[in-house]
Image (cartoon, coloured by chain):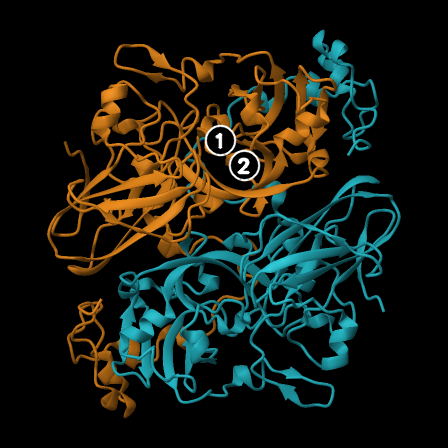
Chain colours: A orange, B cyan
Amino acid sequence: MSELFKGKPTSRRAFLRGSVAAAAGAVTAGAAQAGTPDPLITDVQPWATGLGDGVDASPYGLPIEYESDVVRRNVEWLTADTISSINFTPIHALDGTITPQGCAFERHHSGAIDLKKEDYRLMINGLVDKPLVFTYADLERFPRENHVYFCECAANTGMEWAGAQLNGAQFTHGMIHNMEYTGVPLRTLLEEAGLDVAGELQDKWVYVEGADASSNGRSIPMGKALGDCLVAFKANGEALRKEHGYPVRLVVPGWEGNMWVKWIRRIEVTDGPVESREETSKYTDTLADGTSRKWTWVMDAKSVVTSPSPQSPITHGKGPLVITGLAWSGHGAITRVDVSKDGGKTWETARLAKEGEAKALTRFYLDTTWDGEEMLLQSRAMDDTGYIQPTKAQLREVRGENSIYHNNCIQTWWVRPNGEAENVEVS
Amino acid sequence: MSELFKGKPTSRRAFLRGSVAAAAGAVTAGAAQAGTPDPLITDVQPWATGLGDGVDASPYGLPIEYESDVVRRNVEWLTADTISSINFTPIHALDGTITPQGCAFERHHSGAIDLKKEDYRLMINGLVDKPLVFTYADLERFPRENHVYFCECAANTGMEWAGAQLNGAQFTHGMIHNMEYTGVPLRTLLEEAGLDVAGELQDKWVYVEGADASSNGRSIPMGKALGDCLVAFKANGEALRKEHGYPVRLVVPGWEGNMWVKWIRRIEVTDGPVESREETSKYTDTLADGTSRKWTWVMDAKSVVTSPSPQSPITHGKGPLVITGLAWSGHGAITRVDVSKDGGKTWETARLAKEGEAKALTRFYLDTTWDGEEMLLQSRAMDDTGYIQPTKAQLREVRGENSIYHNNCIQTWWVRPNGEAENVEVS
């Protein structure tokens, strides 16, 4: 780091004489010349002379206006309209791991509906001894759990199969969010409905559907339903947002976001999968030979450099540079992330901000020095099953180029000497 | 749990004949009589017949209108105006541990100021070899860390010293929030300024001040400054909110919130504490004999039941009841929380949602059955130093009733047979 502030220090002696103007010469920012006093240091700043906002200014606060570019965005050409569509988390501008609800991506099949808690009902029926209908108030009486999980749309990075299409991590990898959910285990509710959860259920499934017009029905094998699925009503401590399924959604940890049914209204225990529209004509993976893989629920290990990236260029010239990004796996915890600056020829192991947690986002950092030359930036995730994130070429070899879903390939950003970055493919 | 849904099950045989109306008779909610079809089940609901909002409806989302009571609130009589004042996190309505920035409490001494990133400067001066001024862009070039920490105002629960004053967990215990912070260790910046961080520094301090008119200067002993303090610029993944110190605040884990200086503009290395206004006339603890304790920085272990509580009454009658709350300690991790229903005569050990993390909120649950009788609900936290949260009587014995700060006593809610709760004292 020693190069970063070269030329900036003033002598301690000069400084201790109280010459603030001398220190001001140390500022690198803006157009200040060395030795030219920085008015932001030497003058009394306007924000230090008066009073600011009171505590009644925002009962529920929003980001400051200067952050107005850090918002969800949709891609106009991607869908016919904005109702059955998607928007993207601004992951290029976030850090840490938690996604605030206000900028957490949305995917709707018939729009975000308005459903009050008092109008909410959840039916459990089918092959259960005691079909039940729960109100919202009923759900609050069962033992709750809290877990941080990522929710990734199966189509995340889906536009990239055929080539580098979208210029920004928000658009290539932003169909993901990571929140702390509070809810009741689905297992608990199935048991309440008389399902013998310790019995012979390996051939049984549940069919889950939402209260919106699309209903977005999906089949889930019983092992997962009795595993870590949650019927959730809070995210990051507060009520789910309307667009995330208020008042209640299903959480299916590590599995594709389409199965995390919003406004969940019915859970039917069945003898087999329903083979609904959302798991046949959609959310299956068309291979090179025209056949389709189905039941590809788990989101494989994946990662992306969020900065620098096309929407987050390097603006400071050569010297110390923080490269950062996100990694995740639907199979378990991230154990390691490597970063390459040369398109995958050589790799350096990144620092994980915390030990990886199962089915949750992990933040990684590579604290490095940039020589000012171009880079082909990549990241490569590994999870605790030993799986290593593949290259796009490796994925295509197995899956062809017809797929939309489950593209977890290594992403490349071409960073130019001017610090700008672009989405590219490397062979 | 068997009592909860008594009378609700219909027979599986009846249900499998396809009689949805029969199942509707099982609903407990609303005014539906047994056997009376619930129109929310039997009719096509309005929200299932049309389209909802598109993904362009809210680039940055807010809570749904039905949650409009889950907001920060101030207490009119508490301060002369709303500028040098405080508002409170609606902890009675939250679950999990993360506090969304939008409803995380604020405390200002001269209001929340408007400070752009490009106008931001952080000076490190005093007893350092290379006094420096950092811009915001400079800070982004140092290695970052992510940590979830609670921030509690020293005055949280301060109005309760003399008796039960405020009727709601939001007001008695809501001067607290818990967020995932991203920032640069203060140690790193002090080292950059030439401080010999491995040297003999045990008598040295730092004096930190903010860019607002109050400046809110505080002295921090060097051990803490070189320990876990962060110069933070993100919370819960995104930029700090204006009211939380945008663009940069100090994070002083486990220590009183007043030291978490917002809009931090200067860090001076000194030979001793400055004895500023904020650490002499304020933020000291006046004892019964009129003398004051000072340098009482650490927030001792504490807990509160958030539901049921005055703002979150029991509405469902006797039977299964989830009692939940929060526990935390500035000394380390919460290891155990006990709950009493009889004002401290008998205790049951609560379930921690996750293993306690150092200096972060821990959520606890007691999954119980309510007999419909009155309760005197209390919670009692223990941390990994072996410390046990005291009663108010124990605290008063040592500290009298003149204090404002550092009231970490056991809180009591009197829950009446009608489910309503009230703030009371028990002897």
| Residue B230 appears in the figure | yes
Point 18% across, 47% down: residue: A341
The answer to whether A180 appears left or right of B365 in the picture is left
Q: Quadrant of residue B411?
A: bottom right
Q: Are marks 2 and 1 in contact (CB under 8 Å)?
A: yes
| Residue A90 appears in the figure | no
Q: Quadrant of residue B413?
A: bottom right
The answer to which of A48 and B99 lies nearer the viewer is B99
The answer to which of B224 and B23 lies nearer the viewer is B224
Q: Amino acid at mark 2?
A: Lys
- The N terminus of chain A lies in quadrant: bottom left
- Residue at numbered disc 1: B53
Examine the rendered structure and indicate whether residue B368 appears above or below residue A410. below
The chain to which mark 1 is attached is B
The answer to which of A13 and B136 lies nearer the viewer is A13
Q: CA distance from mark 2 to mark 1?
A: 9 Å
The chain to which mark 2 is attached is A
Q: Position of residue B50 (x, y in %)?
A: 54, 21
- The C terminus of chain A lies in quadrant: top left
Q: Secondary structure at mark 2?
A: helix
Q: Position of residue A353 (x, y in %)?
A: 38, 53
- Residue at numbered disc 2: A242
Q: Position of residue B36 (x, y in %)?
A: 81, 19
Which mark lies nearer to you, 2 or 1? 2
Residue furthest toward the bottom? A17
